[in-house]
Image (cartoon, grey):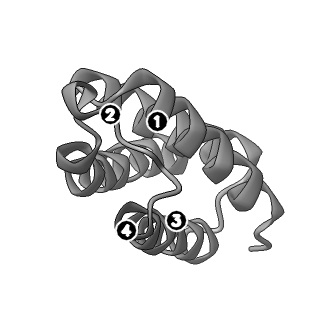
Amino acid sequence: MLGGVFKTKEIDAFAQGLSATLAPRLAAAARPRTDSPALAGLIDEVEARAVEFSREQRLGIYGKARLCRTLGEALTEAGADPAATETIVSRYIRRIARARA
């Protein structure tokens, strides 16, 4: 039980870091297209980092869900476009859920 408390802090900190990487490119005023080549590369890079983190930390289903939820919340708080945020988070949920520990 106690190990889970520390892991949630690590998950939240990691998700905040991912958000800091993505949020500037997802400003709501710019209405970003997540399929544009410039943004797609960044999204793929961040997705790979999230999957690797999931594997390294051996996250279970709740840890993976927390990672994606915290990322979505952090992007929203940073002012990212809601549609782009939803697209990215749903994509990450599907990809991370398939990742094996």
**Do the residues bearing badges 3 and 2 touch, measured as CB atoms within 8 Å?**
no
* Residue 1 can be seen in this image: no
Sequence-wise, which precedes: disc 3 or disc 4? Answer: 4
Q: Amino acid at mark 4?
A: Leu
SS of the residue under disc 1: helix
The answer to whether 42 appears left or right of 100 in the picture is left
Q: Quadrant of the N terminus?
A: top right
Q: Is residue 95 above or below residue 7?
A: below
Q: CA distance from mark 3 to mark 2?
A: 14 Å
- Residue picked out by circle 2: 75
Q: Give the mark toward the camera: 3 or 1.
A: 1
* Residue 9 can be seen in this image: yes
Q: Quadrant of residue 16?
A: top left
**Do the residues bearing badges 3 and 1 touch, measured as CB atoms within 8 Å?**
no
Q: Position of residue 98 (x, y in %)?
A: 82, 63
Query: Which residue is at the front of the view, 14 or 4?
Result: 14
- Residue picked out by circle 1: 84
Residue at 59 percent of width and 69 percent of height? 51
Numbered mark located on residue 42 in the image:
4
